[in-house]
Image: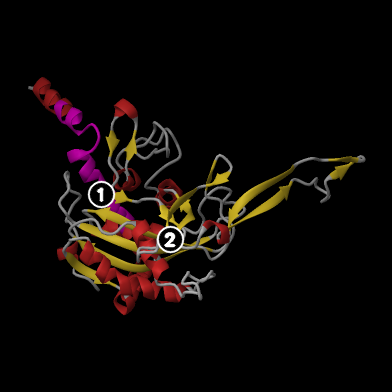
Amino acid sequence: MFLQTIDTNRLFRASIPSIPMGCYVHFVVLRETHSFPLFQTDQELNFARVSAGRNGDEEIISRIVMFKRKQTTPERLTGRELLRRYNFLSENKDDAGKYCEYNSANFCKHCPDCIYYGFAIGDQGSERSKVLVDSAFSLSNYDESHESMTFNAPYEHGTMSRSSETKHSFGEQDHVLPQVFFPSVITVRDPTETEFIYVLNNILRTKRYGAQTTRTGALENHIAAIIFADGEIFSNLKLTQTLYDMLEKDDDGRAKKGPYQTVELVRNIERVSPALLQDDHVTTHLSLIGDNLDSLIAEINALVTSEATLVEVLQQAYAECQDYYSRSGAGAEKRANKNRQGKQDEK
């Protein structure tokens, strides 16, 4: 056991189960942009027209959408980077058993990234993700959440002209503004203790999202609550609309425009979570907010910032994923039949 501030025996599975067992942990995250990220498809920001709030206000607004893969991919890559750093994965194709290539037909199928987050390789098998993520919506409307910016590609001396000829590499692109918030619920189904730490560490460590992350995309994940329950809870959109209803209103009864304050939004999530959970008809085993949440985050921070204990967590995660792979992973039945056949041949 690694964690002392919560009852790990009651809240976590001893091993990764082969079938769902009705044990869920939910990370309620407030994602805050710190630069000008690009959450786009085909050169345009993704957005959706939805109700502004849930209190009977029929106003329809456009919200920027952060699709699920825009969230999970950077977090997965953070975890994979650590696995390679401590030699649990390899970039060398000749390194048998450790070579794993992301988003290809060369997933290894048995590392923590493959088992926790899932994969699909056609007829070679698949693993359903145990980390459930959905699209997140901006708290503020589209008009106050983005800005169209021009860009160019100057020559090395810093201008667009050379030999009396002007380069025409000008363009325009929509960027999300700083301090735009995306409330998001990340769910881990039937977590083990090390899976819980591994996924949460990825969320806390990941700092860049969207396209062009070498130039922009800084984003901070604020953990507003951690909820252990026996089922899934409220959606990202429902949480966003509820928070919108709690914003300060102008004389016309409309939410005042941002930027909004992180501390106040986190407090609002703490206030509305109990009522939203009641609507979800689930049994809540533990809901961590405020000081209790801070204590757990501090304990996890102490674990993952010490190289020795971080390696222990990764070793345990790797071992339990190997165990799951041998029992229930992709191709487990074929491997079992092959082993049985081998034993019969020996006889």
The image shows residue 337, relative to residue 262, as above or below, that is above
Q: Position of residue 137 (x, y in %)?
A: 44, 56
Residue 102 image point, x, y percent? 42, 39
Kindly give the residue lying farthest to the top in the view shown. Answer: 345
Q: Nearer the viewer, mark 1 or mark 2?
A: 2
Amino acid type assigned to the residue bearing label 2 in the image: Ala
**Of 307 and 123, which appears nearest the observer?**
123
* Picture layout, residue 84 above or below residue 240: above
Judge by depth and name the residue closer to the eye, 346 or 211. 211
Which quarter of the image is occupied by the N terminus?
bottom left
Query: At numbered mark 2, what does the secondary structure look like: helix, strand or loop?
Result: loop
Q: Which residues are magenta?
A: 313-337
Q: Is residue 320 above or below residue 258?
A: above
Is residue 328 something that shows in the picture?
Answer: yes
Q: Please state which amino acid type lies under the numbered disc 1.
A: Ala
Q: In the rendered view, tell whether residue 43 sits above or below residue 5.
A: above
For residue 316, say whether it is visible: no
Along the horizontal axis of the image, is 27 left or right of 154? left
Write the residue at 37% across / 57% down. 237
The numbered dot on residue 319 is 1
Instruction: Give the alpha-carbon distance from disc 1 to disc 2, as whole Å.
Output: 46 Å
Q: Which residue is mark 2?
A: 52
